[in-house]
Amino acid sequence: MANKVCDTAAAALDGVLFDGMLIAAGGFGLCGIPENLIAAIRDAGTKDLTVASNNAGVDGFGLGVLLETRQVKKMISSYVGENAEFMRQYLSGELELEFNPQGTLAERMRAGGAGIPGFYTKTGVGTVIAEGKEHKDFPTGPDGADETYIMERGIFADLAIVKAWKGDTAGNLVYRKTARNFNPNAATCGKVCVAEVEEIVPAGSLDPDMIHTPGIFVDRIIQGEHEKRIEQRTVRAA
């Protein structure tokens, strides 16, 4: 087994990045985001990126830093409400946006990882989401009545970047609670997957039943420092 452990995020991305690439990024809001790898992409200056991610972080943090430097050409996302720069660029026509329902986006990543080029779903039928997509009727309604579905395409990314709680030197990953979110699906759909973790442990020390992403999907891994910002802090009056 080749050594998958890299000392820095820049080293983990060395030889992987190129202009115009498609990146699948794990995370939900600011929970479970690969912030060190995002910063390394910013520092590398890779541009004209298409990024598939539930959202784009917030202003000045997470994927938001790539929007500020104008390195992202297109977002494939389901939520944009916490990032003012994201909204500004979209409304001004500077940024392309492909809206996906959250479940559809997760399934598109999972399908890509499973080698499935397309699938049918009822989600979005009759809305702008369905415009320009193939429609097909299946007998899935009451008493076998036909219902309309739309076809969505699997995401086959050039690079997947994910954040996990623990990983071993073989690349096996364990996510912690809600930080799992989009990470397992994103990890599988990239031609190359780079993971950042809070702790790297020796191969064989993780309980096999607790591994969420098998190391076969992970090409490189780093241990990083993580800020873990709170996106919306709500407090109660004393």
Image (cartoon, rainbow, N blue to C red):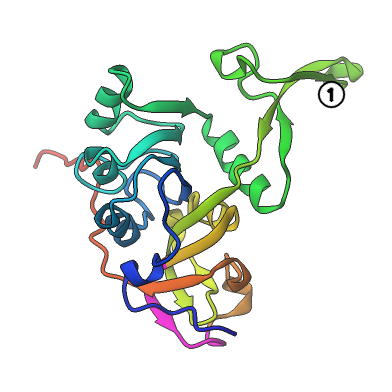
- Residue 212 figure quarter: bottom right
Q: Residue at x 27, y 37 (%)?
A: 70
User: For the point 34% across and 50% down, which residue is it?
Assistant: 46
Give whichever of 96, 119 is nearer the camera: 96
Q: What is the magenta range? A: 196-205
Whether residue 197 can be seen here: no
Q: Nearer the viewer, residue 31 or 24?
A: 24
Q: Residue at x 47, y 46 (%)?
A: 21
Relative image position of residue 225 (x, y in whole percent):
26, 69
State whether residue 151 appears in this view. Answer: yes
Furthest residue in direction top, as rendered: 126
Residue occupying the point 37% across, 77% down: 199
Q: Main secondary structure of the magenta part?
A: strand
**x then y, percent, for residue 116:** 73, 45
- State the residue position of label 1: 140
Quadrant location of residue 5?
bottom left
- The x, y position of residue 111, in whole percent, is 67, 45
Q: Is residue 170 left or right of residue 39?
A: right
Q: Residue furthest right?
A: 143
Q: Is residue 163 left or right of residue 90?
A: right
Residue 47 vertical placement versus 170 (above, below) = above
Which quadrant would residue 103 be assigned to in this image?
A: top right
Can you give x and y, in whole percent of width and height, for residue 73 in the image?
38, 34
Report the amino acid beneath label 1. Thr
Residue in front for this viewpoint, 173 or 118: 118
Q: Is residue 127 magenta?
A: no
Relative to 210, say whether 105 is above or below: above
> Is residue 68 placed above or below 143 in the rendered structure?
below
Q: Secondary structure at mark 1?
A: loop
- For the C terminus, give its image quadrant: top left
